[in-house]
Image (cartoon, coloured by chain):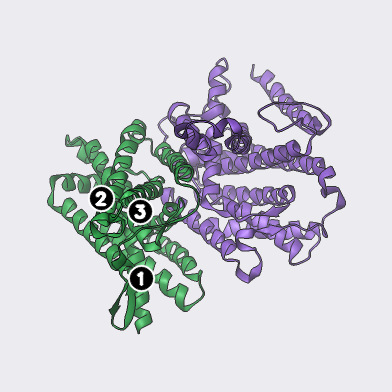
Amino acid sequence: MSGLRAVVRPTTAVAVVVLLALLPKLQLAVPGVLPGPTWTVGTLQLLALCLLVGALAVTYDLLFGLTGLLSFGHALYFAVGVYLFAISLQKWHLAVLPAALLTLGIGTVVAALVGAISLRVGGISFAMVTLAFAQAGSLLVYRNFGGLTGAEEGLGLSSAKLPGSLLGVANTRNLYWLSLAVCVLVYSAIAWLARTRAGRLMAAVRENELRVQVIGVRPYLVRLIAFVVAGALATVVGMGYLLVQGGASPQITTSSFTLSLLVMVVLGGVGARWGALVGGVLYTLLDQRLTVLASSHQIATLPAALRVPLSQPLFILGTLFILVVLFLPGGLAGLASRLRPVDPHDGGEAAHHELSYPAAMEDVT
Amino acid sequence: MSTVVLLAVTGLGLGALYFLVASGLSLIYGLMRVLNFAHGAFLTVGGYVGFTVGKHLAHGASSWPGFVLMLLVGTLTGAILALLTELLLIRRLYEREIEQVLVTVGLGLAAVALVNGAWGSDSQSFPAPAWTARTTSLLGAEIPNDRFVCIAAAVGVLAGLLILLHRTRYGLIIRAGVENRAMVTALGVDVRRAFTVVFVIGGAAAGLGGVLAALYNSTVSPGMGDALLIYAFIVVVIGGLGSILGSAAAAVGVALLQQFTNYYAVTGLGDFMVVLALALVLLIRPTGLFGRTA
């Protein structure tokens, strides 16, 4: 059974990626979910956004789900990717590749510095310190120091420095494929990391820090590695986001953006990578489609008691989130594994959804 | 000199708002280990409900009785919201602290979105008694009177909390629970009653803070609670989670640091200094200035 699963899982993954890669060539229509057939520009743009946010949620899951670190500042590294990439292209006039390398380098350094400081405290204090650092980054963007970030208006991306294949409405599908590539890269990198010795240690630190110490490993270093890798990958996703969105807006630096990442991961299922991905995609789709729904004719004619809540996507998402936390621990991934027939060999990956909240340690043997 | 006095009193006014949010957060965290992300929403909803009542008072909106009524309504709104949150959401997830935090995150998002929908996303001007808009001369500085109202309210809440904590039986249970919850339970005291009490007190302080924040800013806006919440978190951590006096001291310190740096150095630098102060305090004293347990 487990041997079969070892074959089935990668096959499913490859099939999904191939299907996603073919979408711009297909004419699939999912009324109500997607704004149009899959080859249209609007739909591809939305799907690209979904894939990138999904990838970002997977990097957050590396912190929260795998390592058990509740960070409230993950938006910072994503924002470094978006803003620094934009600034090095627009203001410093670098070519794409040097700009990307510089951004990735600085994103990694920022993650290492913030991680090195904030990991000296644990639990809720850690959450607060990461929140504070991200808040400092957000202030930096909003206050427009040195005239680099454009404050509230954000930064546009002019075409001078970008290759022609990424420009124009006709090339939206190239951006879509780029997003898919970023998503696959981030997902595979984290999946690979989770299987290495370092990844096992991350899960071990989450479950029982003391025992990790006893076998002679410093939990601090393990956490720092997870923090830096998650930050660097978030920077990569941020660069993709800048290209797809064609600009940077300051909302992505705020703490509520980090909170929405938390919402995505919990919706999808903490500790299940594909759950986080699906959570990110679903959240983005819902957010976009509910915004369209909010301005629709059907909503406008409802009585106020229904119209007001239904016209606020965040109200619906927040409520949905509360319901998932209350009634569906393990999120979508937990639901899927409950619906599946029980497989005794499948204990490692799927069974720890509920355990992976750092407070729940009683199941460790 | 007059600038220093003006900055100091304005800073104290801001510190008063921080304290009103932070005191509840700190008590709730100290006793229940729940970091309440919905606390900003309690403040916002309290502020808006108080504001709406004020607007509907035909003549009394800018009179003193009208203002007192607004304060009371805001406080009551915060208390009721907190009561419902504790009974309907937090209690179900007893001893599952991460999930409790997650639920408050969801509630915060949903409640602020609802405020957005019900009252609109634009900020609206707040009807306040005429006296609060005038200034009083103090040591040569012209200080807006609303600062004094905020400070007086915060001092009142601080005194009330200290009396409650140190002079009543509930206070005894709360203090004991902050120190060692397991032992209090083992002695046969139902700590969960104290949870509800603490949550309601925190919500009431936040609701009061909502009306006062509206007075301080002279507007209400859906984002006002969450804007204060981040600094309140910083205040709570610097002061030491669970310590009321620590919160009060840290609130004043953080607000003054912010005001003076923003004025004398670069605008916006004060906010960075606060973050820096938090990092420093946590590195030197991870339990905060007044915190005892890790």
- Per the model, the C-alpha gap separating discs 3 and 1 is 17 Å
Q: Which of marks 2 and 1 is nearer the N terminus?
A: 1
Residue type at mark 2: give it: Leu
Residue type at mark 1: give it: Thr
As drawn, is A240 to the left or to the right of B51? right
Are there few (<14), some (14-19), or many (20+) residues within 10 Å of tag 3?
Answer: many
Chain B appears in which tint? Answer: green
The picture places residue A239, in percent across and down from the top left corner, at 71, 52
Say what secondary structure mark 2 lies in.
Answer: helix
Residue sitting nearer the eye, A39 or A117 = A39
Question: Image quadrant for the N terminus of chain A?
Answer: top right
For disc 1, the chain is: B
Are there few (<14), some (14-19), or many (20+) residues within 10 Å of tag 1?
Answer: many
Residue at image coords 80%, 43%: A172
The answer to which image quadrant residue B190 occupies is top left
Chain A appears in which tint? Answer: purple
Question: Image quadrant for the C terminus of chain A?
Answer: top left
Say what secondary structure mark 3 lies in.
Answer: helix
Figure check: A22 above or below A167:
above
As drawn, is B100 to the left or to the right of A170? left
Residue at image mark 1: B10
The picture places residue A40, in percent across and down from the top left corner, at 79, 35
As drawn, is B137 to the left or to the right of A264? left
Residue type at mark 3: give it: Gly
Residue at image mark 2: B72
Residue sitting nearer the eye, A200 or A338 = A338
- Per the model, the C-alpha gap separating discs 3 and 2 is 11 Å
Residue sitting nearer the eye, A228 or B52 = B52
- Per the model, the C-alpha gap separating discs 2 and 1 is 24 Å
For disc 3, the chain is: B
Residue at image mark 3: B210
